Image: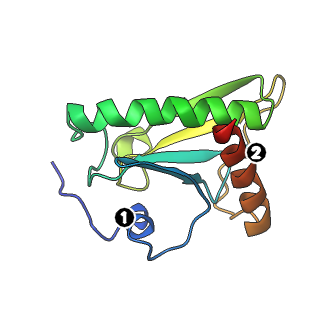
Amino acid sequence: MTSYDTNNIFAKILRGEIPCHKIHEDEHNFAFMDIMPRGDGHCLVIPKAPVRNILDADDAVLSALYPAIARVSRAAKAAFNADGLTIQQFNETAGGQVVFHMHVHVIPRFDGVALRPHTGEMAKPEMLAAHAEKIRAALQA
């Protein structure tokens, strides 16, 4: 198995070296807006532990991560009055993983609205900030 790269972008976000639009943080996990959203409210939930993906995450990491995913998912759905959610987690290059720190995509979904294509284009920071605020408010409700 490939070793964990401590210089991946999510590790840098966790260390505060790269800014993000934070939604939630607890002892074990961190959630923030995806800068290339495929839908309004698209966010990521990551463990703070240095794991590449589900293939090297131990049970303790996963046990702490999934309640955080559920909490952020419920808040994102409520914040955007979404009809549903898409939850995605990719593993290794062949599985579609691009950033090699385990992360779970939470994307609010709306009936009849397709996901936007992944173009590599970054969203406007003010939009991400507004979306993060909506989700944070829903977490407090």
Q: For numbered disc 1, what is the local secondary structure?
A: helix
Q: Earlier in the sequence, mark 1 or mark 2?
A: 1
Is residue 38 shown to the viewer in this render?
no
Please name the residue shown 36% across and 40% down the image. 91
Please name the residue shown 33% across and 45% down the image. 92
Considering depth in this image, is 29 or 90 the residue closer to the camera? 29
Please name the residue shown 53% across and 47% down the image. 44
Q: How far is disc 1 from disc 2 in space, using C-alphas? A: 24 Å
Residues at badges 1 and 2 in contact (C-beta under 8 Å)?
A: no
Q: How many marks?
A: 2
Q: For numbered disc 2, what is the local secondary structure?
A: loop
- Where does the image place residue 97, in percent across and percent down from the top left? 42, 47
- Where does the image place residue 93, in percent across and percent down from the top left? 37, 47
Is residue 3 shown to the viewer in this render?
yes
Give the residue pinned by disc 1. Answer: 11
The amino acid beneath tag 1 is Ala
Considering depth in this image, is 121 or 81 the residue closer to the camera? 81
Q: Is residue 106 above or below residue 9?
A: above
Farthest residue in the front direction? 141
Q: Which quarter of the picture shows residue 72?
A: top right
- Where does the image place residue 134, in percent across and percent down from the top left? 75, 47
Give the residue pinned by disc 2. Answer: 40
- Where does the image place residue 105, in percent across and percent down from the top left? 54, 41
Left or right of 102 on screen, residue 75: right
Quadrant of the snapshot with the C terminus: top right
The amino acid beneath tag 2 is Asp
